[in-house]
Image (tube, helix red, strand yellow):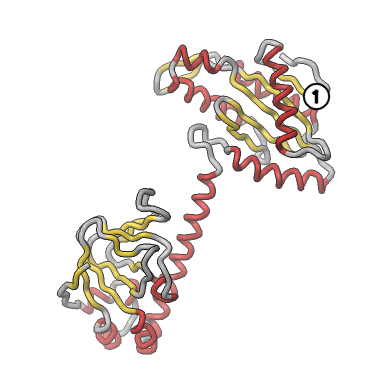
Amino acid sequence: MKTAHWQADLQQMRQLRLFHNVAASSLALLLKEFHACELEADEVLLSPFNRNQYLYLLLKGQLKVYLGSLDNQAVSTLEVGECVGEISFIDNDHPCAYVVATAPSLVLRLHRESLLKLLTQSPQLLHNLLELLCERVRQGNQIILDSEQHANIDTLTGSFNRRWLEHVFARENTRCAFNGQPMCLLMLDVDHFKAYNDQHGHLAGDYALCLVAHTLRKQLRPKDSLTRYGGEEFVILLPEMAAEEGRSIGERLRRGLEQINSFYSPVGVLPGVTLSIGLAQMRAKDSLQSLIARADSALYQAKQLGRNCLCGEATDRLC
């Protein structure tokens, strides 16, 4: 970063959020505390490894914000008129993100030693800065929420993943036990999936898994959790449901998929697939692992009986 020559245009500066509604006389004094700097493309402005003592205001160019590593995707883009570094500028600590210029850029920077003097000169500047800080906190909370949601979703099928299953099991197990309600778990496996991949290709297999997830999901209640457990295996948690009703739901899901003889995909028309299903009902001392183990044992029985059927505790083969 190098110092640049810059001539203030008061009318233009008053349009920027940081200086919104700041009196012209106060603004002229405020701008004397700011210094212009030029950034080259790909130059790092802020880094978690370096303490920051400046507030930056972007006048030209563009900045991107990265969390964790510069190898990650940018979480936000800053355009002309936006500020950056507000939090670390105020608390005199390390930034929580990388900020990088994506093109040759011009910024105004303000050293934190000037902060108290400026806020005394212009309460409106304090108001504007607090608004920017609140917005940045809300953006950060949304990033956390989005990241958490993405961490719980299987990117191929859009179903929940095993991480979410562990979370939702703990919640629903506690809730059902407190209310004296039963809970069931279905373990589903796509029949002859390896042969399907070998014959039609792995891309076709991916579309078949998406078909399975979509077909199952649209027949479940909002409180039910469909999870891609791994490969071609899915798990469905059915809170407030005993084994008899769980078998009815499982059989309806099995028949619904069986009736799809073929489906359209980006690689052309593909044959449908069928499911083998194992069912287990929650017992008092069950963990998620023990419940899945019993459902998996029932699933193995369904495969031994010829596949495309449902087996579970206290039930014979259902086809």
Q: Position of residue 96 (x, y in %)?
A: 43, 63
Q: Which residue carries the number 1 mark?
A: 313
- Give coordinates of residue 216: x percent, y percent: 61, 28
Q: Quadrant of the C terminus?
A: top right
Q: Is residue 99 left or right of residue 271?
A: left
Q: Amino acid at mark 1?
A: Glu
Image position of 207 with respect to 272: above or below: below
Counting from the top left corner in percent of width and height, residue 167 is at: 65, 45
The answer to which quarter of the image holds residue 30 is: bottom left
Q: How many marks?
A: 1
Residue located at (60% from left, 20% from top): 257
Q: Is residue 221 above or below residue 73?
A: above
Q: Is residue 204 left or right of residue 295?
A: left
Residue drawn at x 25%, y 59% is 43
User: At 38% from the left edge and 55% from the top edge, which residue is drawn?
Assistant: 66
Residue in front for this viewpoint, 258 or 203: 203
Disc 1 crowd, CA 10 A, few/some/many (<14, 14-19, 20+): some
**Which residue extends farthest front?**
49
Determine whether, in the image, residue 92 is placed left or right of residue 25: right
* Residue at image point 61% right, 35% down: 227
Give the quarter of the figure containing the N terminus: bottom left
Nearest to the observer: residue 85 or residue 265: 85
Residue 77 in percent (x, y) is at 34, 57
Please say if 126 is above or below 305. below
Local secondary structure at mark 1: loop
Q: Nearer the viewer, residue 10 or 201?
A: 201
